[in-house]
Amino acid sequence: MACDGSIPAFDTSEIHKYLKKVDGWYVKSDNDKSFYLTKNFNFKNFKESQVFVNKVGDIAERENHHPDISFGWGYCKVKIFTHAIRGLAESDFILAAKLDKID
């Protein structure tokens, strides 16, 4: 479930605690020092990338939590953060875990 902005963003100790629960995701920060999760997914061709992106979109709609997605031939890059708090919350890590389970 998406955040409505009424909670504070995770600090670095909370981020690292949750980061251990997801595989292959990296924490980075924007110029304004807000943290986000990012992961690159690799595929054999454009069609596989597109199918994956559509599945990400379906999950995002169900969760009402929408990541930034860029993709092309053989790749998809996903960036997750909670827009309302300009940082990371538990829901971001839950979404990351759900995306990792896409087959």
Image (tube, rainbow, N blue to C red):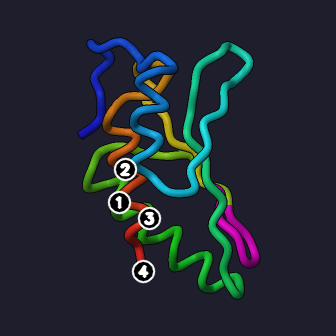
Residue type at mark 2? Leu
Q: Earlier in the sequence, mark 2 or mark 3?
A: 2
> Marks 4/3: CA distance?
8 Å
- CA neighbours of label 3 inside 10 A, class few (<14), some (14 to 19), many (20+): some
Marks 2/3 in contact by CB < 8 Å: the verdict is: no
Q: Is residue 15 magenta?
A: no
- Magenta span: predominant SS is strand
Instruction: Report crowding for label 4: few under 14, some 14 to 19, many 20 or more residues within 10 A (C-alpha).
Output: few
Name the residue tied to disc 2: 95
Q: Residues in magenta?
A: 71-77
Between marks 3 and 1, how big is the CA–CA gap?
Answer: 5 Å
Determine whether the residue tagged by mark 3 lies in a helix, strand or loop.
helix
| Drawn side of residue 36 relative to residue 60, left or right | right
How far apart, in angstroms, are the residues tagged by discs 2 and 3?
9 Å
Is there CB contact under 8 Å for labels 1 and 2? yes
Q: Quadrant of the N terminus?
A: top left
| Type of the residue with mark 4 | Asp
How far across and down, in percent of the image, does residue 103 sit? 42, 80
Q: In the figure, 91 relative to 13: above or below? A: below
Q: Position of residue 85 (x, y in %)?
A: 42, 18
Q: Which of the two residues, 29 or 68, is positioned nearer the viewer here?
A: 29
Residue at x-position 30% and y-position 45%: 64
Q: Quadrant of residue 58?
A: bottom left
In the picture of the structure, the residue carrying the numbered disc 3 is 100
Reply above or below: 36 against 5. Answer: below
User: Mark 4 = which residue?
Assistant: 103
What residue is drawn where x is 32% and y is 34%? 90
- Residue 86: image x %, image y %? 50, 20
CA separation in Å, label 2 and label 4: 15 Å
Check whether the beta carbons of the residues at disc 3 and disc 1 lie within 8 A of each other. Answer: yes
Give the residue at mark 1.
98
Give the secondary structure at mark 2: helix
